[in-house]
Amino acid sequence: MTGGTLHPSAPARFFDRDLQVETVKILPGQYHAARGEGSISTVLGSCVATCLWDPVERIGGMNHFMLPGDAAPASSPWAVSARFGVYAMEVLINEMLHLGADRRRLVAKAFGGARVLQGFGTLDVGRRNTEFVLAFLQEEGIRLVAQDLLGVAPRKIHFFPATGKVQLKRLHLQSGDVLESQEREYLSRLGEAGGGDVEIFPPRRR
């Protein structure tokens, strides 16, 4: 397994008791690629995660980015970061190639882009992320085999590199949730002015 980040912390690793697998959890600005058993997981609001998979070598990877392009000044510590979609896609592809994947075989599944941030006027971060990832995949000739994008519900996803399978659960979002607070913080720090089938699980009721 291999992964990386410019996030202050490295991706967390833990044993998921529900799924009974070793799991790597990624946050905004992080990515992970792997061969073999286990899962990669994340929780998405307006961010987008792209799962890439080589069905021959059974190598898969996931990224999690906050904005489509690099809007930070060159001197900013965030200027070259996987929080930005352009870099997040390229660095994930490169990590997978390093593990032995073939770029010509890659297929993609894309998730996230929900409208969870209120009070940002016409800035719809989720839609911008969605439009970016769809355009990127089309331009790069990477086939999109599944997607669950836009809407208003956050999502929790698990991606299994050995099979290309994704499990997705939609979550309820309430004002003041940690996810919303985190995304507002990320936007502030970034300088913003205010394959298998996809299994859909029902949201957990509070």
Image (spheres, helix red, strand yellow):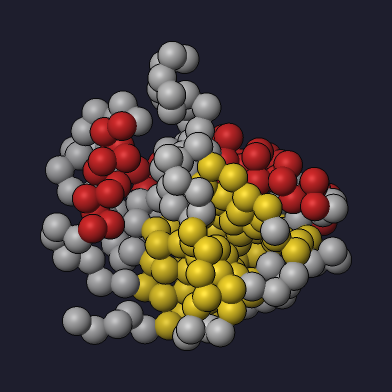
Residue located 13% across and 60% down the image: 175
Does any portion of residue 172 appear in the rendered image? Answer: yes
Q: Position of residue 66 (x, y in %)?
A: 41, 43
Residue located 24% across and 37% down the image: 122
Q: In the picture, residue 78 is in which quadrant?
A: top left
Q: Position of residue 106 (x, y in %)?
A: 76, 55
Instruction: From the viewer's perspective, tell me whether residue 5 is left or right of residue 121.
Output: right
Q: In the picture, residue 76 is in which quadrant?
A: top left
Q: In the picture, residue 57 is in which quadrant?
A: bottom right
Does any portion of residue 147 appear in the rendered image? Answer: no
Using the image as rendered, state which of residue 65 and residue 131 is in the foreground.
Answer: 65
Q: Position of residue 150 (x, y in %)?
A: 39, 58
Q: How many marks?
A: 0
Instruction: From the viewer's perspective, tell me whether residue 39 is left or right of residue 149.
Output: right
Quarter of the figure that contains the C terminus: bottom left
Using the image as rendered, state which of residue 129 and residue 89 is in the foreground.
Answer: 89
Q: Position of residue 161 (x, y in %)?
A: 69, 67
Instruction: From the viewer's perspective, tell me whether residue 7 is left or right of residue 160.
Output: left
Q: Is residue 118 placed above or below 157 in the rendered structure?
A: above
Using the image as rendered, state which of residue 185 and residue 128 is in the foreground.
Answer: 185
Residue located 43% across and 83% down the image: 201
Quarter of the figure that contains the N terminus: bottom right
